[in-house]
Image: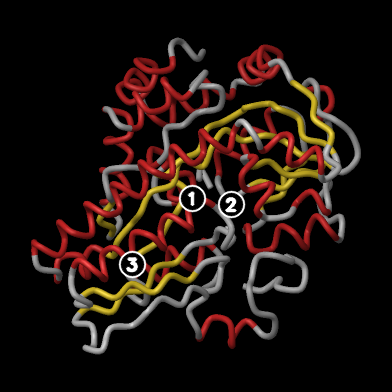
Amino acid sequence: MNDNTSGATGRRGFLTTAGALGAAAALPLITLPRYAKAAEFNLKYGSELPLSHPQVARIKEATEAIRKETGGRVDIEVFAAGALGSITDMISQTRSGAIQMLSVAMANMTTFDPKASLTIPYAFKDYNAVWAAMDGELGAYSRRVISRFGFHVFDHMWDHGFRQMTTRTKPINSPDDLKGFKIRVAVVPMYVSLFKALGAAPTAINFSELYSALQTRVVDGQENSLALIDSARFYEVQTHVSMTNHIWEGYVTAFNDAAWKKLPGNLQDTIKKHFRDATLAQRQDMVALSGTLQAQLQAKGMKFNPADSAPFRVALSSAGFYKEWKEKFGPEVWAVLEKYSGNLA
């Protein structure tokens, strides 16, 4: 999650209703049964991800389980597909308390502090390395950083997957294919820095505007996990998928800290328990999907090509990318990262 209110007409499949954003934002996009007794705690949960994304399905499951176990005392309405605004908007709304809960890529929190996400490009070779780091010292460090900015962050992260590059015009096989290439990146300083170091022309665009930007050729490519490429229907506006695995991204559930502290301890425990179960189940969902998504996307017309990571890592090192981020993180934090990633210089 690494991985973001308008754009309903350009993002077919994102919103279940058409029309003006104001109307969409006024109603929850996911309607769940209501209990006869009014809830004691009415909470809003924002997500940028499409309704069909596995993370949203598990969020729905968790919120209904919480409602049931608390006898309707806690009612969490889920607003998916950017119904409450861009990810930038929703971060601000969660900090202010306008909404109480948010799924957000750790990388999006780096606008507060670069150390909010320590998932450096090409740091993790596989999921064993990812979860050792994220459920261990590295993930705990990032969550502590995020919590300093008005959030209570749940311990277990959602899997957004390894990010791949998609393009309309050509496959990406090496850094040379990125020279001057117009690629959309999330509004994340590290992602902009990454693609500049590779010689591309990155443009930071919120996810809610991405389908339209691809459709109107503001940019010619983007990078995201296969699950999001599929659920966001990017196969309608992109042709090639280059399996670069250039960065793994995780999402956290962030709660407005003041709102969290108002909840009784037993309700906090219930919410944490069901979101822990939901995140662990979603991780398995992503594993199951990994075996089928390529075939599904190929059936929808996308062309896949493998891309060796070695030339990309060499290009990043030569451009001073790792040196720059080591200085930003500091030697102590970098040492924690390299406990899980190995030498990145």
The kind of secondary structure element at disc 1 is: helix
Residue 236 quadrant: bottom right
The answer to whether the residues at label 1 and label 2 have Cβ atoms under 8 Å apart is yes
Q: Is residue 125 shown above or below 79?
A: above
Residue 174 quadrant: top right
Q: Answer with left or right where residue 126 lies relative to residue 14.
A: left
The kind of secondary structure element at disc 3 is: helix
Q: Is residue 236 shown above or below 80?
A: above
10 Å crowding of disc 1: few (<14), some (14-19), many (20+):
many
10 Å crowding of disc 3: few (<14), some (14-19), many (20+):
many
Q: Nearer the viewer, residue 27 or 252?
A: 27
Q: Position of residue 299 (x, y in %)?
A: 81, 41
Spatial CA span between label 3 and label 2:
32 Å
Q: Nearer the viewer, residue 222 or 272?
A: 272
The answer to whether the residues at label 3 and label 1 have Cβ atoms under 8 Å apart is no
Q: Which residue is mark 3?
A: 64
Q: Which residue corresponds to the image point at 52% horizontal and 75% vertical from the top-left?
A: 29
Q: Position of residue 258 (x, y in %)?
A: 20, 68
User: Which of label 3 and label 2 is nearer to you?
Assistant: 3
Q: Position of residue 14 (x, y in %)?
A: 65, 65
Q: Amino acid at mark 3?
A: Glu
Q: Which residue corresponds to the image point at 47% horizontal and 48% vertical from the top-left?
A: 105
Q: Amino acid at mark 2?
A: Val
The kind of secondary structure element at disc 2 is: loop
Q: Which mark is residue 187?
A: 2
Spatial CA span between label 3 and label 1:
27 Å
Task: Work out whether mark 1 precedes mark 2 in sequence or the reverse, and give the earlier one.
Answer: 1
Q: Which residue is mark 1?
A: 108
Q: Which residue corresponds to the image point at 77% horizontal and 68% vertical from the top-left?
A: 10
User: Which of label 3 and label 1 is nearer to you?
Assistant: 3
Q: Is residue 97 shown above or below 280?
A: below
Q: Which residue corresponds to the image point at 74% horizontal and 35% vertical from the top-left?
A: 295
